[in-house]
Image (tube, rainbow, N blue to C red):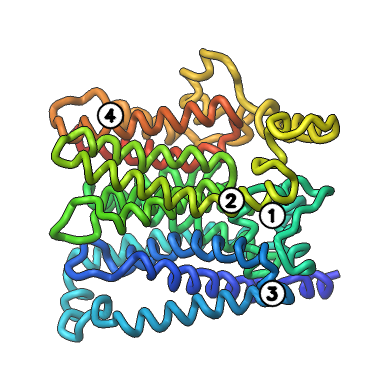
Amino acid sequence: MPRELDALGSGLGAVLAVWLVALAGGGLGGLVVRFTRPSRWTIGETLLVRIVVGLNLLALLGVVLGQLGVLAQGRTGWLLAAGSLLAVVDLVRTRGDWLPTAGSWRQRFTSRPALSTALIGGLALLAALVTLGPALCFPAGWDELVYHATLPRRWAVDGWPAFYADLPYSGFPSLGEILFWLAAPIESLVTSRLLVWAAWLAGFVLLEAILRRRLPRHVSLALALALAISPASLLVSANCYVEALLVADLAALLFVLTVPQRAASDRVSFRTATILGILAGGAAAVKLTGLVLLVVPLGVLAALAWKPSRRIRALAAGGVATAVAGLVALPFYLRPWLATGNPLYPYFASWFSDDPARLEMSRYHHAIGGAWFGVHTLDAFLTGPILLAFRDENYDGWFGWQLVGLLALAIAALVNRRRRSLWAAAGLLGLLWLALYAFWFFTAQQARFLVPAMLLVVLLAGLGFRQLG
């Protein structure tokens, strides 16, 4: 039996597969995310944003070329190799922009802030390694065994991302499963878990990077970890739940919005709008619940347009972001549409068919996704954020009592008007959170589905901490 399990896959092969996927993503992401001098982004932050953006572009190429039959017979590896080569060439070509000079090494590693950062970073890395164990194990969860790990293996055999009538989830937008399929020729069983864990970790690193600009390092790390180590978040990291990809996309999107790359500019450029569109479109392509994340960049750009001097640029940037998001997401919805006549398959079958079997299948999938979980009353809408702290049986997961502390700080940010600029930012974050929470409440009330939206609560808590003084 152990020999048979070894033949299915290995942790070492998964590490190699995820490393190649990340490298290829970094190469493609480098086409739109450039190293700049002077820059407000560190080298690590730039690389992380590149990788997250590039993963969406890599999956986009995978679904388009896969539908055309170009990646059959294990040729997905060639796509990863091409993206990796692009990354290496770009890093060599731009090494003058990101490689520290020899004279800066001593100051970089001997200054007190650098030593403090290294100590805190080391502790964070140790905490991350504690969560790595499940990511190197064989899949065992229901979602993994039904489709997250099964679909890539079946697609690898057939040579393209086919639709299977016996597996309705093969009709999903499926950006995550496309990434798993691209890595399948290298390793196809453990890779899905490890890639999800890497995306989860990247998302929280970028969240902490946003908070670090406004708070002491120990406070920013504590707030980020308060969500990262919550049971619902750890559930996502320990299983192949693609909410981790939504966490990475939303964290990168918020980072790009709140931390301008150029030190001399705070304007939203069309390049930035393109990056926002790729991230929002990629989130929409992960699963249907990712569609709502488009509210975040459009909401921020609409707020910028409130000021007349920024109106034209902000509206134009919003148009660019929307158009790019649509172009990125379209192929993922076109695939199930061509195969089944329903771009949202297996959901909302009544919009596209009157076949009794399909209607019953759709009703079943709506039920297991939403009706079996949550409390669907007005009182629960108001008390849900508190119930999510401890009512595991209601929401198939919970966030722990630290959620109450985060909510208290978030409320402090919303009611404290001593600093007008912070209060205005808190109001915008509060409205965006309310939109995401309402979408979650009226669709599928599972705790893990709300993990991406909780990033906004952490940012609100950071503003509340600042306003308290």
Residue 403 location, x and y as percent?
43, 34
Q: What secondary structure is marked by label 3?
A: loop
Q: Earlier in the sequence, mark 3 or mark 4?
A: 3
Q: Which residue is mark 1?
A: 148
Residue 171 location, x and y as percent?
71, 48
Say left or right for 279 vs 395: left
Q: Marks 1/2: CA distance?
A: 9 Å
Q: Which mark is residue 427?
A: 4
Q: Marks 3/4: CA distance?
A: 48 Å
Query: Which residue type carries mark 4?
Result: Gly
Mark 4 vs 2: CB contact within 8 A: no
Residue 103 appears in the figure: yes
Query: Which residue type carries mark 3?
Result: Pro
Specify the quadrant that holds the C terminus. Answer: top left
Mark 1 vs 2: CB contact within 8 A: yes
Q: Earlier in the sequence, mark 4 or mark 1?
A: 1
Specify the quadrant that holds the N terminus. Answer: bottom right
Query: Which residue type carries mark 1?
Result: His
